[in-house]
């Protein structure tokens, strides 16, 4: 879209404008809008920003203030016009200029070969040229531009008409508010596309739901579709939606001349890309003959997991528009296009039973037991139902046929029950009122969706706490797996966390499955864990909301763990990575007498509650510097590199911010690298440069 000369000129203009706004000097608003649109393109389309977020905000706020002073200065395509005022009261139905027909589906190469045969017969060609592109798994949209301005956005709806969602579409930064279609002789155009959430943004959104004890969304497609119908546009803006535009369904050209780029489907994709849209220009391929198409589809399916977004297949289109017109369409689908669907990642099964499991914090999680079903290469027989509300909202019953999906291709998730096929023998799922293990009456705090057993000594909680304590990322007691812990607990050899360091090995010797070698290895592993650093012990304690990074923050904040007994919630909130919920949870843990007694006993048994590194930090080569590691490093494991940084006085952060000094990047660095590029103060270095900082 922008040539090298234009890029240099706009970047120079950006710097000049930043200096002027800082000095309180006036800026030409037309030029400013052009600069802001350029930076939106660099950020949302190219994923390669040239200025930092605060600098963009500085220019944006200047424009916003000038338009507020004199509303007559506002133009329809101004970047400020994305931001909506107030709520959308209603979504009205609007008719598409051309019906949005469904695509015919194929599931194997035989279907594609047969479709190609029909295309060749109808066109009279021996070989047809096709354009092949990903089938995005999102929510379909239709956009209309008139005289270069976005005038309407709509959902697919019935295919003939959909809901008008223009205000919400404007919140998607990869959709231009204006595009110079007039350069191609086009006065009005309707383009089709897909709104989606990347895997990373979908995970972030679900992580946010988890912190609120809300069930995650099933998949990015549902998340995207639901976002488009939110009535508050500001909320839509927070979802970080993206849009791929992949089809021109209609255009008018008053002078009767058609630009050559609009004569082929691949050419129209190129045009959209040049005009600033996210079109699948990098993913599509123009191929002759169905054999080449099948090969490309298979290659793409093998690499689908590496993509930053979800796709569920490929779309094959006859490339030449005149041939598309000759092939025409049925009442249901065009004859010139077909969808090749990848192997299913959904399946149907039967809900056989529901078990209620008790977590280490007392949360009660219903787990559906289903008849084993093969989905995307994995056999699924257990599916978490998260909480009681999910059971009620989905109207689940024992004996139901259910649709199961691997959310994000990983987590099994029940999408819905197939209520229409019930036979009357199904049974209601009764959520327990008492703990299924210790029979303590369950409680549900007003702000939570989860029922809890508040008996600290509940056997299930005790076992889960021990399992977490010994895990790899906690105290890393190897050879002490879940099955052994449960067996020792049932036999009375292990009743709590301190009991790990007081196991009766004389009684264990000779038991089936416990030879002398396995006993010696387990003893050594337990003894080695006594030397683990304080941050590992803090994480191992299983304090609610405290992950590995926060555990390191807590470890560096004191000389001895007991100091947290005297800290207030406000003092803890002032620490990095510690918010209101986390601070309250830490305060509660260190003001519980049973927890304090456990810590005192662990210290008596030889575990370190003091921070040995606190005095060493001042002497390291990296003292006072903050680090974050991302991607796969060439020679070091990330955990080893982090340990080296900390051993030399550095402090580790969990995310990219202005507080970060160094980002050490490896292969496939991802979003952290992109974010760091926008913050001038962050130094981006390689593993080799990191080692040089250490003098190695």
Image: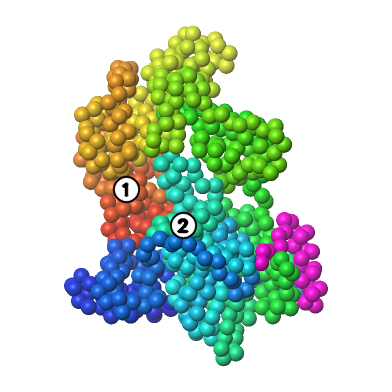
* Pointer 2 residue: 230
The spot of residue 326 in percent (x, y) is 74, 78
Q: CA distance from mark 1 to mark 2?
A: 38 Å
Which label sits in the foreground, 1 or 2?
2
Secondary element at tag 1? strand
- Residue at 35% in and 70% down: 80
**Is 101 placed left or right of 88 in the picture?**
right
- Residue at 35% in and 40% down: 549
- Residue at 41% in and 41% down: 212
Secondary element at tag 2? loop
Q: Which residues are magenta?
A: 100-126
Which residue is situated farthest in the left direction here? 23
Disc assigned to residue 627 = 1
Residue toward you, 599 or 446 = 446
**Is 56 placed left or right of 511 in the picture?**
left
Residue toward you, 641 or 365 = 365
Question: Disc count in the image?
Answer: 2
Q: How many C-alpha atoms fall within 10 Å of the one at disc 1: few (<14), some, or many (≥20)?
A: many
The spot of residue 614 in percent (x, y) is 23, 35
The spot of residue 49 in percent (x, y) is 38, 66
Which residue is situated farthest in the bottom direction here? 255
| Earlier residue among tags 1 and 2 | 2
As drawn, 504 above or below 565: above
Displayed quadrant of residue 168: bottom left
Q: How is the image coloured?
A: rainbow
């Amino acid at each position: 879209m922008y040539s090298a000369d234009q890029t240099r000129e706009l970047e120079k203009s950006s710097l000049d404008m930043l200096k002027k706004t800082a000095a309180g000097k006036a800026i030409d608003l037309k030029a400013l809008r052009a600069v802001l649109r350029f930076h939106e393109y660099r950020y949302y389309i190219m994923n390669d920003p040239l200025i930092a977020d605060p600098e963009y905000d500085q220019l944006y706020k200047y424009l916003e203030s000038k338009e507020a002073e004199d509303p007559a200065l506002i133009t329809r395509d101004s970047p400020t016009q994305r931001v909506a005022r107030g709520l959308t009261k209603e979504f009205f139905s609007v008719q598409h200029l051309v019906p949005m027909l469904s695509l015919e589906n194929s599931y194997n190469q035989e279907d594609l070969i047969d479709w190609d045969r029909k295309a060749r017969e109808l066109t009279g060609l021996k070989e047809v040229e096709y354009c092949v592109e990903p089938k995005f798994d999102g929510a379909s949209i239709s956009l209309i531009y008139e005289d270069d301005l976005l005038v309407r956005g709509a959902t697919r709806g019935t295919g003939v008409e959909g809901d008008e969602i223009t205000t919400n579409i404007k919140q998607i930064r990869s959709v231009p508010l204006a595009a110079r279609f007039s350069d191609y002789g086009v006065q009005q155009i309707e383009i089709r596309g897909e709104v989606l959430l990347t895997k990373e943004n979908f995970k972030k959104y679900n992580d946010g739901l988890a912190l609120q004890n809300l069930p995650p969304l099933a998949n990015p497609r549902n998340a995207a579709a639901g976002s488009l119908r939110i009535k508050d546009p500001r909320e839509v803006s927070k979802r970080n939606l993206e849009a791929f535009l992949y089809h021109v369904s209609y255009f008018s050209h008053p002078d009767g001349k058609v630009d050559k780029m609009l004569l082929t489907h691949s050419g129209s994709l190129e045009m959209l890309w040049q005009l600033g849209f996210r079109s699948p220009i990098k993913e599509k391929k123009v191929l002759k003959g169905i054999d080449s198409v099948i090969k490309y589809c298979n290659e793409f399916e093998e690499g689908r997991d590496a993509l930053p977004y979800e796709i569920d297949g490929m779309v094959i289109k006859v490339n030449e528009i005149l041939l598309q017109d000759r092939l025409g369409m049925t009442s249901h689908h065009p004859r010139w296009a077909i969808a090749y669907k990848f192997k299913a990642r959904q399946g149907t099964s039967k809900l056989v039973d529901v078990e209620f499991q008790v977590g280490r914090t007392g949360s009660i999680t219903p787990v559906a037991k289903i008849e084993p079903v093969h989905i995307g290469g994995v056999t699924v027989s257990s599916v978490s139902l998260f909480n009681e509300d999910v059971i009620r909202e989905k109207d689940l019953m024992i004996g139901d046929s259910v649709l199961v999906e691997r959310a994000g291709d990983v987590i099994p998730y029940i999408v819905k029950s197939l209520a229409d096929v019930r036979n009357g023998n199904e049974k209601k799922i009764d959520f327990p009122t008492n703990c299924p293990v210790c029979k303590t009456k369950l409680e549900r705090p007003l702000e939570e969706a989860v029922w809890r057993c508040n008996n600290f000594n509940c056997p299930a909680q005790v076992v889960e706490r021990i399992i977490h304590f010994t895990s790899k990322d906690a105290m890393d007691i190897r050879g002490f797996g879940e099955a052994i812990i449960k067996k020792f607990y049932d036999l009375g050899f292990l009743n709590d966390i301190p009991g790990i360091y007081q196991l009766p090995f004389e009684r264990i010797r000779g038991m089936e499955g416990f030879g002398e070698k396995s006993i010696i290895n387990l003893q050594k592993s337990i003894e080695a864990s006594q030397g683990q650093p304080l941050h590992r012990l803090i994480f191992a304690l299983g304090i609610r909301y405290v992950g590995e990074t926060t555990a390191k923050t807590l470890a560096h904040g004191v000389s001895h763990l007991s100091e947290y007994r005297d800290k207030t919630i406000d003092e803890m909130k002032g620490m990095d990575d510690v918010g209101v919920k986390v601070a309250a949870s830490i305060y509660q843990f260190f003001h519980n007498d049973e927890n304090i007694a456990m810590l005192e006993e662990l210290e008596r048994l030889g575990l370190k509650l003091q921070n040995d590194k606190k005095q060493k930090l001042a002497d390291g080569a990296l003292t006072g510097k903050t680090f974050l590691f991302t991607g796969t490093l060439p020679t070091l494991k990330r955990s080893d590199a982090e340990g080296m940084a900390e051993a030399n006085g550095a402090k580790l952060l969990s995310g990219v911010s202005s507080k970060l000094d160094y980002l050490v990047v490896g292969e496939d660095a991802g979003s952290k690298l992109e974010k760091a590029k926008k913050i001038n103060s962050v130094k981006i270095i390689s593993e080799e440069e990191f080692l040089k900082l250490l003098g190695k």
